[in-house]
Image: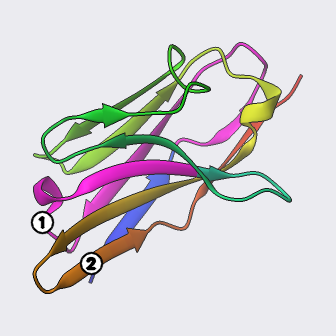
Amino acid sequence: QVQLAESGGGLVQPGGSLRLSCVASGFTFSSYAMSWYRQAPGKEREMVAIITSGGGITMPDSAKGRFTISRDNGKPTVHLQMNNLKPEDTAVYYCNAYNMDYLGEYDYWGQGTQVTVSS
């Protein structure tokens, strides 16, 4: 059974930091691209950071310089270190695992963890 368990969310003041973690099980973690997405109230879900199975990283400009994504295939866990948080970073953050092969696509989501940035 595939499971993605996020943790590390919470309430933080502007300028603060949080480290989100996503522990994976039930699939071959090292073969999957791992991502963090977020969804704020009334907005569409958006990608925050992606790390491929080979370690390549993609993130939008809004995250560059503030967020860092990393993975530990031995645990297996993906982290999102978020620094200099802003109120507009407030959202539910979701962990995603994605892979595709000749049989099809595999797209798994965690249940999310709330991040609130407020003074």
Residue at 45%, 56% in the rendered image: 95
- Looking at the image, residue 29 lies above or below residue 7: below
Q: Residue at x 10, y 46 (%)?
A: 74
Residue 28, label in figure = 1
Q: Nearer the viewer, residue 12 or 58?
A: 58
**Eyeballing the image, is 48 above or below 5?**
above
* Distance (Cα) linking label 1 and label 2: 14 Å
Task: Specify whether 97 is left or right of 27.
Answer: right
Say whether residue 26 is magenta. Answer: yes
Instruction: Give x and y (percent) for residue 46.
Output: 61, 51
Mark 1 residue crowding within 10 angstroms, few (<14) / some (14–19) / many (20+): few
Q: Callout 2 environment at 10 Å: few (<14), some (14 to 19), or many (20+)?
A: few
Label 2: state its secondary structure.
strand
Picture quadrant of residue 111 = bottom right
Residue 15 figure quarter: top right
Residue 13 magenta-highlighted: yes
Q: Quadrant of the C terminus?
A: top right
Residues in magenta, as a range: 8-37
- Which amino acid, by three-letter code, is at mark 1? Thr
In front of the other: 3 or 29: 29
39 with respect to 102 (left or right): right
**Residue holding disc 2:** 105
